[in-house]
Image (tube, rainbow, N blue to C red):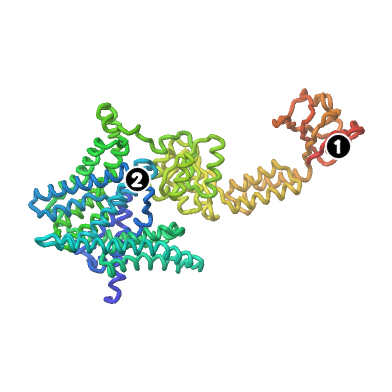
């Protein structure tokens, strides 16, 4: 089995990671915790199967490349500039203060200054993956605090890239600082950035467009992989910079292409899969025995990460004019470390700046801080309310503007729409015209920005795969409309919504006939299949043209919908309604007559006209000035402009027509509509 060692390691790592991720989500923890625990289980320090650390470590390098490529692909100077007043001074200031905290912590244990600096660097950088997940799950991603947090981690990520570039040069200094080596490293990095950006900015978008015109999905994905991996490897081999920097710049360059969103969608599965292997490889380096023997040190280190970083953030909030809610959200969501701390730790270990125990401390602190972070996030609102009870403290912290409320707190008695595609857009436009409050959930960032510009309350996130649905206020909503085209995702949304609000009316969109039944069983009262609905509409128009009564047609089509579009006439209601429809079409005709000013019926009551006795036809309705008078009373007088509805068989309707023609032979004054 030696020849398939790589395959065995990949399969075992992914299977164990999957199980760990599912368990973590079930108990309300980030999936990263499950992946790290999976690595511990198959690592060399635990009994049972032992994965090949070197093999999985090499695969993890791909995870680093794809992670950094994804960061570059979504990097935007415009977004960073919008939150610059918070992100830039906050990220830079807190990194400096946190490095000093880490250095002080390490000196208590007698570690070298270089090790202390590396520890400080590692704990100063929050996990982008964990941050995005927590913001999404708490409905904060498209709010001002959420945008500030994203800008903050962008600054930290850029600082990490710069540190990774400079670290080899700084680590190789002996007694004298090698300014020449530092200068050469910076020149190489600058040269690579300039060449990749200015050449790649023109070449790579052109290549992607040409490949897109071939209409080959495989070639397009292959081109994206070649660009990401080729630029990263070229950066390392030709310019001597890190794979991480190369991948980041590759993402920035590809972001200039109009196809960048498609690139992001195609690269996401690779990014997720190899990122999982990256986290598993990190977990394999964790020694449970070390954690057990050094539990006091690890708990103190974790407290430094969770509470020390939060304290520094709040301290800066008192110094800088930030909104109080933004400060509290930043303090909570950034109080953890993750993937970039691992990358820095690995680099420090390779350069001899950290020993294995110190690296294990970083891993253990990361594992605990990621586990605790969702709980810390849930404390932001209670903490905000508690601080507001002390006006003097609250005034010092909230010196910029009142705390902003999230989208779900601003609406009540609303309609929740999941999906802002073509169907969702029509629904939202209609609800807006009718002044019915509504809230939209969508996973497309551009659509969320469009909704924000329109002033429509919205939540960014995947309603089927996160806790964002819990922040949509379903318990206060009037209805839920699941309008997305992904039927599997719609089923998850309907099931979750029914658990959250058992009495909530749910309208869902189906794309298959099997999905109609599934969605109905999960709790959707009304399931709409666009294609079958179009068929019903064709049936309705056809029957109208054939002269069947509209009311009977509507009753029949509603029965078909209620039977989930079953094409077979197999329910008692459908048999009865079809019989009524046929019977009505054979015996009854409905005719509408418009009465002009010189019609002899004008001024007479229905009783005086005595039309039923004279013709057998009955007056069943009058349409007057846009208002329908159904089953008018015998004392109702006819007026000019009335549209009078008569019901009867063909002979009776013909008798009405003849009677009116006889009484108004000089000037008919009657407009016939059937």
| Residue positioned 29% across, 46% down in the render | 88
| Residue positioned 66% across, 43% down in the render | 554
| Residue positioned 11% across, 60% down in the render | 176
Instruction: Indicate which label's residue lies in the foreground, 1 or 2.
Output: 2
Circle count: 2
Please identify the quadrant where the C terminus is shown.
top right
158 vs 553, nearest the viewer: 158
373 on left or right of 630: left
Sequence-first disc among 1 and 2: 2
Element under label 2? helix
Q: CA distance from mark 1 to mark 2?
A: 71 Å
Q: Position of residue 197 (x, y in %)?
A: 36, 61
94 vs 416, nearest the viewer: 94
Q: Position of residue 350 (x, y in %)?
A: 18, 63
Furthest residue in direction left, as rendered: 110
Give the quarter of the image for residue 267.
Answer: bottom left
State whether residue 226 is above or below residue 514: below
In this rendering, does residue 632 appear at all? yes
Element under label 1? helix
Q: Which residue is mark 1?
A: 657
| Residue positioned 81% across, 39% down in the render | 672
Q: Which residue is mark 2?
A: 135
């Amino acid at each position: 089995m030696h020849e398939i060692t790589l395959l065995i390691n990949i399969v075992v790592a992914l299977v164990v990671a999957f199980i760990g991720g599912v368990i973590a989500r079930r108990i309300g923890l980030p999936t990263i915790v499950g992946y790290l625990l999976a690595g511990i289980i198959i690592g060399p320090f635990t009994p049972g199967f032992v994965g090949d650390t070197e093999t999985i470590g090499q695969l993890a390098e791909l995870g680093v490349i794809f992670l950094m490529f994804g960061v570059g692909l979504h990097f935007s100077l415009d977004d960073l500039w919008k939150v610059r007043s918070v992100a830039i001074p906050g990220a830079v200031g807190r990194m400096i203060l946190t490095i000093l905290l880490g250095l002080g912590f390490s000196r208590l244990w007698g570690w070298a200054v270089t090790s202390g600096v590396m520890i400080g660097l590692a704990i100063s950088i929050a996990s982008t993956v964990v941050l995005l997940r927590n913001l999404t799950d708490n409905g904060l991603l498209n709010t001002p605090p959420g945008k500030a947090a994203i800008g903050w981690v962008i600054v930290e990520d850029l600082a990490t890239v710069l540190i990774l570039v400079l670290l080899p040069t700084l680590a190789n200094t002996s007694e004298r600082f090698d300014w020449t080596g530092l200068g050469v490293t910076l020149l190489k990095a600058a040269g690579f950035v300039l060449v990749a950006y200015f050449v790649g900015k023109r070449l790579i978008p052109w290549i992607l467009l040409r490949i897109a015109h071939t209409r080959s999905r495989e070639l397009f994905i292959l081109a994206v992989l070649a660009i990401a991996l080729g630029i990263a490897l070229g950066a390392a081999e030709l310019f001597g910079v890190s794979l991480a920097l190369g991948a980041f710049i590759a993402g920035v360059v590809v972001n200039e292409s109009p196809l960048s969103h498609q690139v992001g969608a195609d690269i996401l599965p690779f990014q997720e899969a190899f990122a999982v292997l990256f986290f598993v490889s990190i977990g394999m380096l964790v020694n449970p025995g070390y954690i057990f023997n050094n539990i006091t040190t690890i708990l103190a280190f974790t407290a430094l990460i969770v509470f020390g970083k939060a304290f520094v953030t709040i301290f800066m909030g008192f110094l800088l004019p930030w909104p109080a809610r933004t400060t509290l959200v930043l303090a909570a969501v950034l109080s953890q470390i993750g993937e970039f701390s691992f990358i820095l730790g690995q680099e420090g270990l390779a350069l001899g700046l950290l020993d294995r125990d110190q690296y294990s401390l970083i891993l253990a602190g990361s594992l605990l801080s990621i586990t605790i972070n969702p709980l810390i996030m849930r404390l932001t609102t209670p903490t905000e309310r508690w601080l507001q009870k002390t006006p003097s403290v609250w005034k010092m912290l909230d010196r910029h503007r009142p705390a902003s409320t999230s989208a779900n707190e601003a609406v009540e008695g609303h309609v929740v729409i999941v999906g802002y595609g073509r169907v969702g857009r029509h629904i939202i436009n209609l609800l807006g015209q009718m002044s019915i409050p509504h809230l939209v959930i969508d996973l497309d960032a551009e659509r969320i920005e469009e909704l924000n510009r329109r002033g429509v309350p919205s939540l960014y996130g995947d309603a089927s795969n996160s806790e964002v649905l819990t922040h949509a206020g379903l318990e206060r909503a009037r209805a839920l409309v699941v309008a997305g085209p992904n039927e599997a995702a719609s089923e998850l949304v309907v099931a979750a919504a029914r658990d959250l609000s058992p009495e909530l009316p749910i309208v869902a969109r189906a794309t298959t006939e099997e999905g109609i039944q599934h969605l109905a069983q999960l709790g959707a009262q009304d399931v709409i299949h666009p294609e079958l609905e179009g068929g019903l509409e064709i049936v309705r128009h056809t029957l109208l043209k054939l002269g069947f009564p509209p009311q009977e047609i509507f009753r029949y089509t509603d029965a078909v919908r209620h039977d989930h579009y079953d094409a077979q006439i197999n329910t008692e209601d459908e048999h009865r309604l079809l019989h009524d429809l046929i019977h009505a079409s054979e015996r009854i005709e409905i005719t509408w007559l418009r009465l002009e000013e010189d019609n002899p019926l004008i001024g007479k009551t229905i009783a005086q006209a005595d039309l039923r006795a004279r013709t057998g036809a009955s007056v069943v309705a009058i349409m007057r000035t846009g208002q329908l008078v159904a089953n008018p009373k015998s004392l109702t007088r006819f007026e000019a402009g009335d549209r009078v509805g008569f019901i009867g068989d063909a002979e009776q309707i013909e008798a009405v027509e003849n009677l009116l023609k006889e009484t108004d032979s000089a000037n008919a004054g009657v407009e016939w509509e059937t």
